[in-house]
Image (cartoon, rainbow, N blue to C red):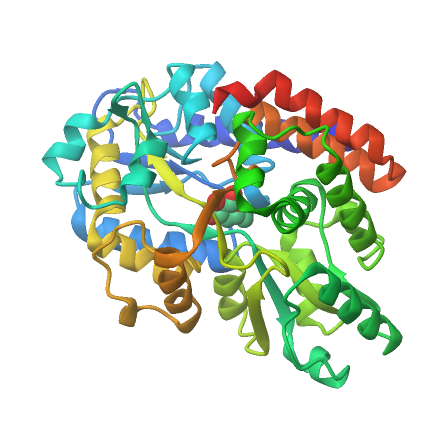
Amino acid sequence: MRFTRRAAIAAVGVAALLSAAACGGGDGGGSSTKDVEVFTWWADGGEKAGLDGLVAQFGTACADYTFVNGAVAGGAGANAKQVLASRLQQNDPPDTFQAHAGAELSDYIKAGQVEDLSAQYGEWGLNNAFPKGLIDNLTVDGKIYSVPANIHRANVLWSNKTVLTQAGITKDPASLAEFFTTLDALKAKGVATPLALGKDWTQLMLLETVLISDLGPDKFTGLWNGSTDWAGADVTKAIDDFTKLLGYTNKDRDSLDWTDAEKLVMDGKAAYQLMGDWEAADLDTKGFKDYGYAVFPGNGDTFQWLADSFVLPKNAKNPDGTKCWLKTVGSAEGQKAFNTKKGSIPARTDANPGDYPQYQQTAIADWKTAQQVPSCAHGSACSQGFQGAANSALGKFSSDLDTAALQKALATAASQFAKTN
Ligand code: GAL
């Protein structure tokens, strides 16, 4: 049923985009368009605010071109990625699209769907603008294919401060054991949903953070490069802890996007939510000030990172306009306009932390010292094939709670897809 509904959403999205392209194409002359269609899933709230910041800077730096918003709503690109896949298959790419640095980007590179930007890196002085580790994640066979807009942190626990205070919770839980005690206390005080949760990919995020706590950062990273066995007893233990956590979540989790789960926290119906730091921007945009944040219990100083980047697709209609967009994305001004509004930190190393809201100032400091691990739910750790398999295994697990089946499905996905990293 889930698949059918998603496929329907994607089909509607494709139809809408195709007809928009047909209407907007206008003169049919074809070659010299000013339009630059930017394809993202940043349609609302803090995500849209970030995009708007970047668009404003594009308007200043690239006045010859016109931004065309190709956003398809749905957290983590749940709908957008399906629409994009159809368009790429039909050789109808947008002028640029967002892709996560790491394995997800490698999918597009290996499929020959994106252009080499190495020359532009030289021309725009980008080779030394980003951290080397990030550049490595954007590079395949010595060529670099996208421009990073940011670094997001995935392993953040958000909370409603008033709900915690009323339940007598005065400190952030530092371990999974402390977290369970805290969740029990919230339950005992009558908090309906101690931990708010959404559908498949948000469940994958939660499982990943539990794996970081139970395996530690090095073994966790090994899950994605083949050096840690998905069939191991430590993974079973993590799935058991994850199952226990599900017991504190809202029953309707499988039908909620991340913003719906976030609303439970804003409305005081839930105490906590595990989510990436786009939540900071979204809460700010929605005017909700009563929130706290902490690293997920047991993750220590691990920074689970992901990066949004933009590409020049093969056969884009307006490559010159796209290059102006990409140059803006990589510029100091573009990164500031975007990241101050998006909850993320700049990928560039020359930013001034003082320009950023308080949350990002702590993230900028943590990024410099923390141990970095990648995210599968957001493409830095695993390919889209692995991600899809993990998401559907979690969707199934959410209703049958069959630990052995989940572990087996993840191990199978790893043997099928892990080598792509
Ligand atoms: C991630 C993306 C973020 C944010 C989030 C929620 O995949 O990298 O920028 O948009 O999804 O939709």
Residue drawn where x is 66% and y is 61% of the image:
273
Name the spot of residue 331 as percent of width and height, x first.
20, 49
In the picture, measured across the screen, residue 127 lies left or right of residue 51, that is left
Q: Which residue lies at the image location 13% right of the left edge and 39% below the top edge?
A: 124
* In the rendered image, the vertical position of residue 332 relative to residue 410, given as above or below: below
**420 vs 211: above or below:** above
Name the image quarter holding the N terminus: top right
Residue 278: x %, y % from top left: 50, 56
- Between 16 and 203, which is closer to the camera in this rendering? 203
The residue nearer to you, when weighing 64 against 386, is 386
Q: Residue furthest left?
A: 123
Horizontally, residue 281 falls left or right of residue 365, namely: right
Q: How many marks?
A: 0
**Residue 108 visible (yes or no):** yes
> Where 60 sits versus 263, above or below?
above
Specify the quadrant of the image occupied by residue 156. bottom right
Q: Can I make out residue 1 in this image?
A: no
Residue 276 x/y as whole percent:
54, 54
* Left or right: 132 in relation to 126: right
Where is residue 243? Give x, y as percent.
81, 47
Q: Reply above or below: 8 against 180.
A: above
Q: Is residue 361 left or right of residue 86?
A: left
Which residue is depicted at the point 82% across and 52% down? 244
